[in-house]
Amino acid sequence: MTETLTISQMAERCGLSAHTLRYYERIGLIQAVARGSNGHRRYSLMDVDWIAFINRMKATGMSIERMQEFAELRRKGECSIPQRRTLLEQHNEQVQAHIHELEAALAALQDKVVYYRECESVMASPTNASDAKGSQHGRSLHTRSAKTQGN
């Protein structure tokens, strides 16, 4: 007999709530789940794999609508493989663009951290303490690079 999971077991295994699993089924992200003789949902290991894929796509920022589109194509079978590949390629391009945006933002953030560390170092320096009191900021606050403009 094939192993099946109750909704609470499935929720625990995939990191979603039972409510979310029912919602995903209602909107067509998950095909109708098999039911036991008592009417309770019984998830298969294939369902576990599919939900893991949904979670990965969600983590990459794929919209529910795009996931629904992919799920519908998946239900159509092998004839939809080219459309599924195209959808994933398009999403891949969007994710790559977002990664590049995040890398640029991270670099700016890291530059700012370095700048503030330098400011703190100058302010704490005993040789600049009297200058810092007089100028209110110390030497490095006036000599920052173009990258760190805009506190």
Image (cartoon, rainbow, N blue to C red):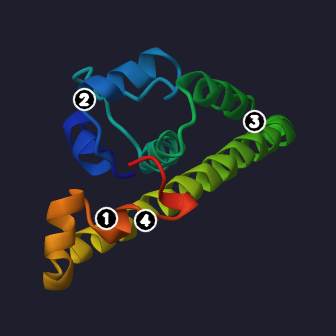
User: Which label sits on residue 110?
Assistant: 4
Of residue 148 and residue 96, the one placed in the foreground of this image is 148
Tag nearer the camera, 3 or 1: 1
Most extreme residue toward the bottom is 127
Tag nearer the camera, 1 or 4: 1
How far apart in space, not on screen, are marks 3 and 1 (Cα)?
56 Å
Name the spot of residue 110 as percent of width and height, x first: 43, 65
Name the spot of residue 131 as percent of width and height, x first: 21, 70
The image quarter in which residue 133 lies: bottom left
- Mark 1 near mark 2, Cβ–Cβ under 8 Å? no
Q: Residues within 10 Å of mark 1 (few under 14, many from 20)?
A: some
- Give the residue at mark 1: 116
Of residue 4 and residue 113, the one placed in the foreground of this image is 113
Secondary structure of residue under mark 1: helix
How far apart in space, not on screen, are marks 1 and 4 (Cα)?
10 Å
- Give the residue at mark 2: 18
